[in-house]
């Protein structure tokens, strides 16, 4: 299991279009991926769950990845949240 704090660096924050793109990235992996804030824990593969975050640029998230492809998954998740790639 990998747990990492990541600061959102998307000018749009995590709103509809970026959330859909993020869920597509997360869904590529077999690992279980969760996004945590101080008040909630959400399955990163759930578009409805991710929409409830309402995260803006500069906010910090805790990402937890657990599974066979966790190292590659955390790398891609961090890349998306920090650079939109």
Image (tube, grey):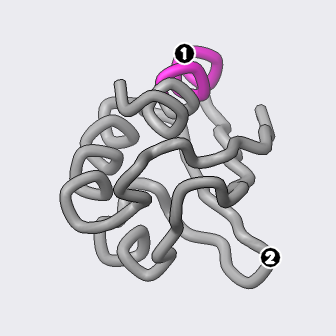
73 over 71 or under it: above or below: below
Q: Earlier in the sequence, mark 2 or mark 1?
A: 2
Determine if the magenta segment contains residue 75.
Answer: yes
Locate the N terminus and report the quarter of the image it occupies. top right
Q: Which residue is mark 1?
A: 72
Please tell me in which quadrant of the rendered image residue 4 appears: top right
Q: Nearer the viewer, mark 2 or mark 1?
A: 2
The mark tally for this picture is 2
Which labelled disc corresponds to residue 38?
Answer: 2
Span colored in magenta:
69-76
The residue positioned 64% from the left and 17% from the top of the image is 71
Please give the name of the residue rendered at 32% of the width and 50% of the height, measured from the top-left corner. 23
On the image, which quarter does residue 67 sit in?
Answer: top right
Query: Is residue 22 depicted above or below 37 in this figure?
Result: above
Left or right: 23 as drawn, with respect to 41: left
Looking at the image, residue 60 lies above or below residue 56: above
CA–CA distance in space, label 2 to label 1 = 25 Å
Residue 16: percent from left, percent from top: 23, 66
Seen at 50% across and 24% down, the residue is: 79
How packed mark 1 is, by other alpha carbons closer than 10 Å (few <14, some 14-19, many 20 or more), is: few
Q: Residue at x 43, y 32 (%)?
A: 80
Predominant secondary structure, magenta span: helix
- Judge the density around disc 2: few (<14), some (14-19), many (≥20) Cα neighbours within 10 Å: few
Residue 74 on the magenta segment? yes
Which SS class for mark 2?
loop
The picture places residue 35, in percent across and down from the top left corner, at 61, 58
Do the residues bearing badges 2 and 1 touch, measured as CB atoms within 8 Å? no
Q: Is residue 59 left or right of residue 45?
A: right
Q: Secondary structure at mark 1?
A: helix
Q: Residue furthest front?
A: 11
Toward the viewer: 55 or 35? 55
């Amino acid at each position: 299991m990998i747990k990492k704090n990541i600061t959102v660096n998307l000018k749009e924050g995590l709103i509809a279009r970026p959330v859909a793109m993020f869920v597509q990235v997360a869904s590529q992996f077999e690992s279980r991926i969760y996004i945590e804030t101080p008040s909630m824990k959400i399955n990163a593969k759930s578009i409805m769950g991710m929409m409830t975050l309402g995260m803006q640029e500069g906010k910090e998230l805790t990402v937890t990845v657990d599974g066979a492809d966790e190292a590659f998954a955390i790398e891609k998740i961090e890349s998306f949240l920090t650079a939109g790639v």
